[in-house]
Image: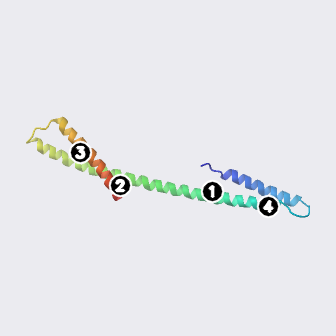
Amino acid sequence: MKNLFMQRLLYSTLLLVLGFIQITLDTSEGFNSGYVMLFIGGVILLISIISYFKSRNNKLLEKERLKEYDERDNLIDGKVAHFSMRFLMCEILIIMFLTTFVVIPTNTALVIVLVSIIIIEFGSRKYYNHVL
């Protein structure tokens, strides 16, 4: 959406100036359209100032919301990484213990570790998204 504040501000000041000029120079009897121009220029000026401040507040709120969302994402990523690292350490210790009794090929052990880490990361991310 385009910011029309400057265009509205210039248009309203133009209407206000033309209204003042028309009021001061018009000496005829009857209805003077300069007052209408002053009124319309004032209304447009008021509307443009209000909409400018509202949009500025909305932008500040949006930045604050995005900042909170980024902090939340960083927190979730940190907790997921911490949980995944703990799980990986336990899994490696279990595999090391099992290899003393059973012969496990290296490729099989690595596939088991990778698949379990993918599943644990997915599950923990869902869990922390739900909890936080």
Dot placed on the residue nearer the N-terminal end, 2 or 1: 1
| Circle 2 Cα neighbour tier, 10 Å, few/some/many (<14 / 14–19 / ≥20) | few
Dot placed on the residue nearer the N-terminal end, 1 or 4: 4
Measuring from the top left, give residue 37's x and y in whole percent. Answer: 79, 58
Give the CA separation, mark 2 to mark 3: 20 Å
The amino acid sitting under disc 4 is Val
Q: Mark 1 points at which residue?
A: 52
Give the CA separation, mark 2 to mark 4: 57 Å
Give the CA separation, mark 2 to mark 1: 36 Å
Residue 116 is labelled as: 3
Q: State the SS at label 1.
A: helix
Q: Mark 4 points at which residue?
A: 36
| Circle 4 Cα neighbour tier, 10 Å, few/some/many (<14 / 14–19 / ≥20) | some
Dot placed on the residue nearer the N-terminal end, 2 or 4: 4
- Taking the view exactly as shown, the residue that stands out farthest to the front is 31
Measuring from the top left, give residue 114's x and y in whole percent. Answer: 24, 41
| Circle 1 Cα neighbour tier, 10 Å, few/some/many (<14 / 14–19 / ≥20) | some
Dot placed on the residue nearer the N-terminal end, 2 or 3: 3
| Circle 3 Cα neighbour tier, 10 Å, few/some/many (<14 / 14–19 / ≥20) | some
The amino acid sitting under disc 2 is Asn
Q: Mark 2 points at which residue?
A: 129
Dot placed on the residue nearer the N-terminal end, 1 or 3: 1
